[in-house]
Amino acid sequence: MADSKNRELEILSAIVDSIAYNLDLDAVLGQIVEIVHKETLADSIFLYVYDEPSAQVVLRASKNPHPTLLGKVSLNLGEGITGWVAEHKKIVEITENASDDKRFKFFHDIPEDRYEAFLSLPITFQGKLIGVVNIQYKKPKKHTPEQIRLLSTVAKQVGGALENARLVLESAALKDALETRRLVDQAKGILIKKEGMSEPEAYSHLQKLSMKHRKPIREIAEAVVISSK
């Protein structure tokens, strides 16, 4: 249980850091997809965001590149498994032959339609629908109750993180976020120059230090900048 709680904290920290560093919501969504993939090693991950005016969930990020579909694929509440999950705010797991489920909706132009296993979780915040994350596997797959619980917790954390991201973009916190980004970029530049790291390696290094010392990535970046002077 302690290991599970520690894992949840690590995931939450990664999500929070992703949002603190990025002001582009699409970039945040992409990083969340990567975090979920790291946890599940799934063959496909689709992240839908709820658009309240249209009452639809819209595909905004995916593990497998689908640039022509992002922002264009949408489902009404109750439409397909994704829409059903959004409407009822309940988890659906299909361990094999997912496309045989009567709720399944084909898009025909994506290979994921034929994947075997399908896990769909609602993303919520304080009871409010934020979106849906779909996790798919090419072969049959059954998650343990512990895995489902962890992924459900992650989905809730993502819901809070995305809601906070929207608030950050609309509030005075934008100034602090910009300063965080400036410090992180400066720290990355120092690591690239002094340690010979690539840009992704430098940012990953800052994230790991943040988790290890349980400090915001901004404090870690600031320490790197100060120590280089």
Image (cartoon, rainbow, N blue to C red):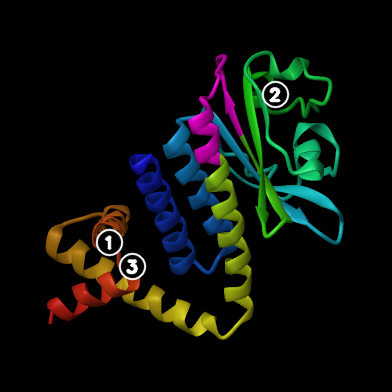
In the image, residue 157 above or below residue 228? above
- Say whether disc 3 or disc 1 marks the residue closer to the N-terminus: 1
Amino acid type, label 3: Ile
- Where residue 66 appears, x then y in whole percent? 62, 39
Q: Are marks 3 and 1 in contact (CB under 8 Å)?
A: yes
- Say whether disc 3 or disc 2 marks the residue closer to the N-terminus: 2
Question: Which quadrant holds the N terminus?
Answer: top left
- Where residue 87 appears, x then y in whole percent? 82, 44
**Residue 228 lies in the magenta-colored region:** no
Task: Name the foreground residue: 133 vs 7.
Answer: 7
Residue projecting furthest to the front: 1
- Say whether disc 2 or disc 1 marks the residue closer to the N-terminus: 2
Q: Residue 122 is drawn in which quadrant? A: top right
Q: Residue 128 is drawn in which quadrant? A: bottom right
**Residue 138 lies in the magenta-colored region:** yes
Task: Name the foreground residue: 222 vs 92.
Answer: 92
Q: CA distance from mark 2 to mark 1?
A: 38 Å
Q: Are marks 2 and 1 in contact (CB under 8 Å)?
A: no
Q: Which residue is mark 3?
A: 217
Q: Which residue is mark 1?
A: 206
**Residue 63 visible here:** no
